Amino acid sequence: MQSSKPHAALLSSPGMGHLIPVLQLGKLLVTQHNFTVTIFVVASHTSGGEWEVLRSSMTSPFCDIVELPPVDISGLIHPGAAVVTVISVMMRESKPALRSAISAMKLPPTLLIDDLFGTESLEIANELGIPKYVYMASNAWFLALTLYVPTLDKLVEGEYVEQTESFRVPGCRPVKPEVVVDPMLDRTDQQYSEYLRIGIEFPKADGILVNTWEELQPQALAALRDVKLLGGLAKNHPIYPVGPLTRPVGSPSSRTNKQLFGWLEKQPHESVLFVSFGSGGTLSYEQMNEVAWGIELSQQRFVWVVRTPTVTNRDAAFFTSGTGADDDGPSNYLPEGFVDRTREMGLLVPVWAPQVDILSHPSVGGFLSHCGWNSTLESITNGVPMITWPLYAEQRMNATLLREELGVAVGPEALPSKKLVGRDEIAKLVRKIMVDEEGFGIRAKVKELKRSAEKALSKGDSSHRALSLFAEVCEVQQNA
């Protein structure tokens, strides 16, 4: 009697940076390997606008999507708690609902795949006696740091950001103190203890999937597999680089903005700068004004996804809906006259835009980005060079990778989170990647990576092989 195919239960944290790659992984497991897939999503405010756009983009009901009920964590965290703390506590408090939802399933899962913030739910797989995996929806360098943080916690005295030398992550490029991930900025903050816990729990999985590909990060992936370097993962915990997994182009709801795409159709090839700081990024009023002046001074065409500026909290928009109204209106917080002066050279899009469709348009030639990993992959896979503007999470590491290792981006001399970036520097950066000769090499490199990404996902190549191997292992485990 032929055995049935595996049934994978995938757990996603709230936030588009987690939902998108989890959904794409589920889709590949169904379409390429005939898995049955159920995706559990922890509900939050993010489950509104952008979540509905994403759900509607799916062309077929390839898997079941179950939203776990919202949890009230107001009594468990202090006001203004960091995003990492908020998500970690939400995921912890959602465990009973996840356990109940899985128990009620007519077809029990044969394996569990948790995302970065869901590692505490690995114990549910232990209870069920099924294999368990973690999906790192970011890059291999960040994964290596996460696995090594428990060791750094013992080696480093004082605050990480106050160290004078870079942190050596075995086998990987060093991590400079100023680019460490947000949870490492303050060791007394709860988000640090949550991140430390995640680093300890990762190796408890039977394997780790990561949203990158072999040819993009060979050094970091080799380190992850070397039994002598990062805790023996290579021996018992295989690493599966299955990326780049990104949102598909051309979803049904993405082209409803006829003005936007009608305008793009009229622009010359690779002449438009796309400006967006992600679904969770905001700028201060002062910095937004400098960005506006910099774009205007550059005299380059642009599409800018604008959101009401904030005063101090850079994470203010993280848990808001992605299609909410912008009640203030751009003219109320951009430089006086900017909207009228730039009416012919660019478009302002309030709050949200179909990013991957914009980046894939032939007229787009540059991307000023917060460097979230989803945005990074969408830019690379469409051959669009970047201006790095990291705001939070692991984005400073992503920006460093893009500029110093991959050579497909430029960025300001000082981190935007540390210092106001002036209009003249912004204008220079825009012109560098859009029109200046010194930016031609950057454009050529990112197009090489685009071809590399396409090849990795092709049948028989690195990422396709990695996911196929993972599927074979899951089938063997199921039939054991």
Image (cartoon, grey):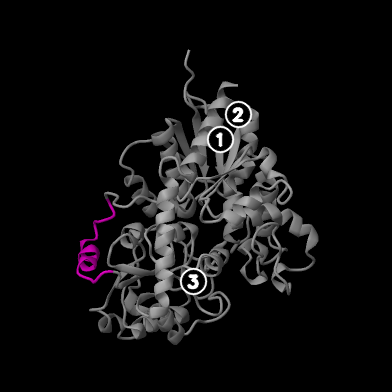
Q: Position of residue 111 (x, y in %)?
A: 55, 32
Give the mark, 2 or 3, whose residue is nearer the N terminus. Answer: 2
Instruction: Name the residue located 59 percent from the left edge and 27 percent from the top edge.
Output: 477
Horizontally, residue 303 falls left or right of residue 184, namely: left
Give the mark, 2 or 1, whose residue is nearer the N terminus. Answer: 1
In the image, 166 versus 82, the foreground residue is 166
Please tell me whether residue 116 belongs to the stretch shown in magenta: no
Q: Contact, CB < 8 Å: mark 2 with mark 1?
A: yes
Report which residue position mark 2 lands on: 130
Instruction: Name the residue located 70 percent from the left edge and 50 percent from the top edge.
Output: 230
The magenta-colored residue range is 253-269
Near mark 1 (Cα within 10 A), the count class, few <14, some 14-19 or many ≥20, is: many
Report which residue position mark 1 lands on: 112
Mark 3 residue type = Trp
Q: Position of residue 27 (x, y in %)?
A: 41, 39
6 versus 144 height, above or below: above
In the image, 285 versus 444, the foreground residue is 444
Q: Secondary structure at mark 3?
A: loop
**Residue 389 badge:** 3
450 versus 33 height, above or below: below
Visible residue check, residue 305: no
In the rendered image, the quadrant that contains the C terminus is top right
